[in-house]
Amino acid sequence: MRTTSPEAGAGRAAIAARTLRTDRWWIPPLTTAVGLIAWITYATVRVFMQKDYFVADYHYLTPFYSPCISNGCVPESAHFGTFLPDVWWLPYAALTLPFLLLFRMTCYYYRKAYYRAFWFSPPACAVAEPHAKYTGETRFPLIGQNLHRYFFYAAVLISLINTYDAIKAFETGDGEFGIGLGNLVLLVNVVALWAYTASCHSCRSIIGGRLNHFSQHPVRYKLWGWVTRLNGKHMQLAWLTLGTLALTDFYIMAVSAGWFSDPRIIN
């Protein structure tokens, strides 16, 4: 009978290789990095262009400029007034964009995405990371990830503003009701944003947390079940909304710049 001393099994196996995986484990983090860099580049350029963000004939306002609160905003696009100075380095929607950025950056899925894609912490499962030590989210700046639940509240408010913009777009420049392809694009984007926001882990915790008996709270239990199903698609919704945001902005930019006309269904 073979016996092993307690000391023999202590610690990790001494493996010199970074990983024993033979598959192309580096493709997912590489794809994630390329996708995020492409989106951030596009969004940054558009935010600082300060033009082609509003279609006055149909009240189409891109979400990248909502709410438009700069003194340089087209008056019809400023649904909540203007009070920011008009300078090139300050986005027209500077009040809300930082909160949206912080909500996305502290999102549980996005943490995994950019931790792996940019910091290699770790780059993939069963692949050693290059860092000598690991402190998790206990020190600055990563301790700020714990504020995610508060950025969630800001994201809900901003989603309400985007919903208002989508509803406002059903009013043409003449004050009449109308529907065009742009309205459908805005609606799809708003629905996707609400789905992503509702799928947030913080939302699930707020709805179903601090309850000892679900049977005594049937409404919250029902809502918790819906949010839980959405939560299972959180990663897909995170990427979907990046796509709908870019598509919505590009469509409104193209119509505003006169590249093509908005196909009208009604008026």
Image (cartoon, rainbow, N blue to C red):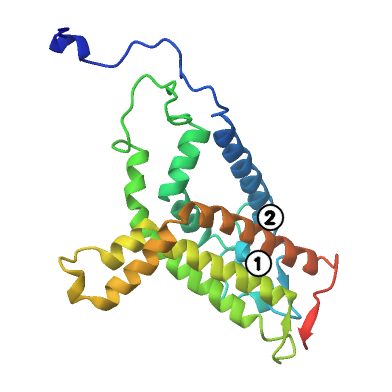
Above or below, comparing residue 67 to residue 1 in the picture: below
* Residue 266 in view here: yes
Kindly state the secondary structure of the residue where label 2 is placed: helix
Query: Residue 255's quadrant in the figure?
Result: bottom right
The foreground one among 154 and 13 is 13
The x and y percentages for residue 171 are 67, 86
The foreground one among 182 and 142 is 182
* Residue depicted at x 18% and y 66%: 211
Q: Which mark is residue 82?
A: none
The foreground one among 130 and 235 is 235
The x and y percentages for residue 75 are 67, 77
* Residue depicted at x 74% and y 75%: 181
Task: Evaluate if marks 2 and 1 touch, with contact meaning CB atoms under 8 Å apart.
Answer: yes
* Residue depicted at x 34% and y 10%: 14
- Relative placement, left or right, of 258 versus 209 is right
* Residue depicted at x 45% and y 63%: 197
Label 1 is placed on what type of residue? Thr
- In the picture of the structure, the residue carrying the numbered disc 1 is 62
- In the picture of the structure, the residue carrying the numbered disc 2 is 46
The x and y percentages for residue 201 are 36, 56
* Residue 88 in view here: no
The x and y percentages for residue 58 are 73, 80
Above or below, comparing residue 79 to residue 255 in the picture: below
Q: Residues within 10 Å of mark 1 (few under 14, many from 20)?
A: many
Label 2 is placed on what type of residue? Arg
What is the C-alpha distance between the residues marked 2 and 1?
A: 10 Å
2 or 1: tag closer to the N-terminus:
2
- Relative placement, left or right, of 102 versus 137 is right
Q: Quadrant of the N terminus?
A: top left
